[in-house]
Image (cartoon, rainbow, N blue to C red):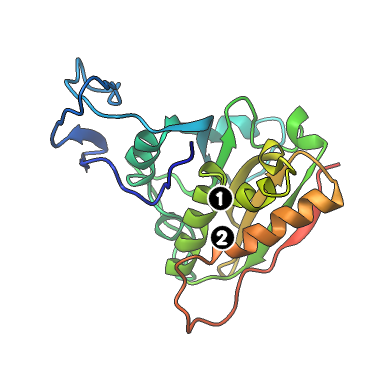
């Protein structure tokens, strides 16, 4: 059974970069320990499982790109397989507009003053690189454009929820195309140099024209969900093979 990721289920807040439980509640016999950083949490709640386990990565910007050391600048922020854990993490991770270049300054994050240039969300076991066996045989739909901060955050959130919540594959399921079996992950990248420019991507494990076009059609519907009706312009996606 699929659950809507728009439903915020957790009464958590953030304090000094640590998650703190604000309250506890009991729903019968369902028990979950969703605060591994807190010793012996006494929290009882129903769990809403996601079909696949997902990993969210953070990529740090460096002055010189070195393909031999790229993994050193990549950090796993979290993994999750329930709606509760998704919101527990996603609500407390800085949005792209809060860390990407906005045309005025390069933003830094944390005590080390790092600059974040990318977020990647992939199924567990698949690394966010072309060379991964699941990625090399497919490609990506990508959009490289400038967006205002609020718009960028909305598109990224919709892309994430469309992938994790399987709404992008829903339309394809009706045609028995099993599109969800091909979606590997998504990325948002700061491609700014002298001016702000961003890139949104969805990675799939096939180059099949029919499957990728079905994904694109649904992607274009999902990504603008919640956008103001009077706003002009939409993301424009192009295809790129990974090999």
Label 1 sits on residue: 167
Say if 191 sits above or below 234 in the image: above
Where residue 178 appears, as percent x and y from the top left, is 71, 40
Closer to the camera in the image, 188 or 70:
188
Depicted 71 relative to depicted 108: above or below: above
What residue is drawn where x is 20% and y is 24%? 28
What residue is disc 2 on?
Answer: 222
Horizontal and vertical percent for residue 170? 61, 49
Mark 2 secondary-structure assignment = helix
Q: Is 91 on the left-hand or right-hand side of 233?
A: left
Q: How many marks?
A: 2
Residue at 50% across, 81% down? 231
Q: Which residue is most to the top?
A: 40
Q: Is residue 5 visible?
A: yes
Asked whether disc 1 touches disc 2, contact meaning CB atoms under 8 Å apart, the reply is yes
**Left or right of residue 207: residue 140:** left
Left or right: residue 55 versus residue 94 is right
Q: Position of residue 235 (x, y in %)?
A: 62, 68
Mark 1 Cα shell of 10 Å, populated few (<14), some (14-19), many (≥20): many
Relative vertical location of residue 88 with respect to residue 225 in this rendering, above or below: above
User: Disc 1 or 2, which lies upstream in sequence?
Assistant: 1
Rendered residue at 62%/41% (across/down):
185
Q: CA distance from mark 1 to mark 2?
A: 7 Å
Q: Secondary structure at mark 1?
A: helix
Between 47 and 63, the one lying in front of the other is: 47
């Amino acid at each position: 059974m699929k659950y809507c990721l728009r439903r915020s289920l957790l009464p958590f807040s953030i304090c000094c970069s640590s998650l703190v439980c604000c309250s506890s509640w009991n729903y019968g016999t369902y028990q979950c320990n969703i605060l591994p950083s807190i010793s012996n949490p006494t929290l009882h709640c129903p769990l809403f499982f996601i079909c696949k386990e997902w990993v969210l990565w953070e990529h740090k910007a460096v002055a010189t790109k070195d393909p031999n050391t790229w993994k050193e600048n990549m950090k796993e922020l979290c993994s999750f397989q329930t709606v509760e854990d998704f919101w527990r993490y996603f609500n407390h991770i800085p949005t792209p507009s809060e860390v990407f270049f906005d045309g005025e300054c390069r933003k830094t994050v944390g005590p080390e003053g790092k600059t974040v240039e990318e977020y990647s969300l992939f199924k567990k076991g698949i690394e966010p690189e072309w060379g991964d066996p699941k990625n090399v045989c497919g490609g990506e739909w990508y959009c490289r454009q400038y967006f205002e901060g609020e718009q960028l955050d909305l598109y990224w959130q919709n892309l994430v929820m469309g992938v994790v919540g399987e709404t992008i594959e829903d339309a394809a399921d009706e045609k028995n195309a099993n599109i969800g079996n091909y979606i590997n992950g998504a990325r948002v990248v700061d491609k700014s140099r002298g001016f702000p420019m961003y890139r949104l991507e969805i990675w799939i494990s096939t180059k099949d024209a029919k499957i990728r076009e079905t994904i694109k059609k649904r992607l274009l519907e999902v990504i603008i969900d919640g956008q103001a009706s009077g706003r002009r312009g939409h993301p424009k996606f192009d295809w790129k093979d990974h090999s």
